[in-house]
Amino acid sequence: MLQIALPNKGALSEETVDLVSEAGYRSRRHGRELNVNDPQNRVEFVFLRPRDIPVYVSGGIIDLGITGRDLTLDSEAAVTELLPLGFGKSQFRYAAPADQDLHPDQFANLRIATSYPNLVMKDLRKRGVKASIIRLDGAVEIAVKLGVADVIADVVQTGRTLVQAGLKLVGDPILVSEAVVLARTPKAAESPTVKTFLQRLQGIVVARDYAVVEYDVPAGTLDDACRITPGFESPTISPLNEPTWKAVKAMVKRKDINRIMDELAAIGAKGIMITDIRTCRL
């Protein structure tokens, strides 16, 4: 039976379980169970601390794991990223007091508070900077105000918490992170059970970025319509009873839906409809 580690708490856990459940697997807990069996799909889901998942996977104790790329790289575990999942997106950034003009290249001899010491050490080595790293398990943004550190390095999504703490982002992102599927080696993806798991997840991840647009368009503007909605490979074009009109169906990026509808309407398209995609295989 395939063993897959899932995060046991937090927003990352909720989104992961939602995705895996949507992919047709029995993975929801009714309490604080450490594992959930899905005999139909021959999978056992084990719930672990997100930070520990790469360690279990690299040791061969667990076959696959889902956790953040930032946690994976900070663990320095020998694992392979098989699939990015498109949620839990964040940046790992430095932040300094808002009233100071500091750059990461100027951090020599400063105290840097972080929950990701290995990521910071690796970045400082690249810069040739020697600084003191203070490891904290949480509430890193308050470390400067309390006098524990001079600057911080932390995961940032909106940055509002940093502003409230009197900090500002400095330098470029050290790392761009999201939830990922991990395995010990790339060969893990050759297993039929693993391949099915990855294909199901990928189908949903792709579907979240796309929608289907359907519309009728005058035959004379069909070329323009196909330019607006080229589809994933090409649009589906069907005849209508009225020979001067064609029906078109294509996949489009969700973020472009409103612009696409505006452009289709401008060339005379009618009956423009957008349909959500639950999952797909491309």
Image: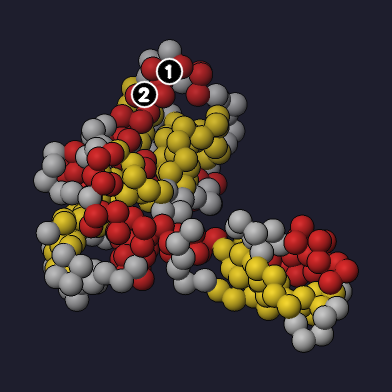
Q: Quadrant of residue 251?
A: bottom right
- Asked if labels 2 and 1 touch by Cβ distance under 8 angstroms, the answer is yes
Q: Residue at x 42, y 35 (%)?
A: 153
Assign a secondary structure to mark 1: helix
Coloring basis for residues? secondary structure
Is residue 239 left or right of 36 when viewed as pictured?
Answer: right
Assign a secondary structure to mark 2: helix
Mark drawn on residue 44: none
Disc 1 from disc 2: Cα separation:
6 Å
Question: In the image, residue 44 lies at what x, y percent?
Answer: 15, 62
Bin the neighbour count of mark 2 within 10 Å (Cα to Cα): few under 14, some 14-19, many 20 and up: few
Is residue 27 left or right of 155 when viewed as pictured?
Answer: left
Residue furthest bottom as drawn: 241
Question: In the image, residue 264 lies at what x, y percent?
Answer: 80, 69
Q: Residue at x 74, y 65 (%)?
A: 260
- Name the foreground residue: 137 vs 43: 43
Q: Residue at x 45, y 36 (%)?
A: 175
Is residue 263 left or right of 139 when viewed as pictured?
Answer: right
Judging by the rendered image, the residue that carries numbered circle 2 is 122
Mark drawn on residue 126: 1
- Name the foreground residue: 30 vs 194: 194
- Name the foreground residue: 46 vs 216: 216
Q: Residue at x 41, y 40 (%)?
A: 154
Q: Vertical placement of 32 versus 118: above or below?
A: below
Q: Is residue 25 visible?
A: yes
Bin the neighbour count of mark 1 within 10 Å (Cα to Cα): few under 14, some 14-19, many 20 and up: few
Which amino acid, mark 1? Lys
Which amino acid, mark 2? Lys
Question: In the image, residue 17 lies at what x, y percent?
Answer: 31, 65
Quadrant (top left, top right, bottom left, bottom right) of the N terminus? bottom left
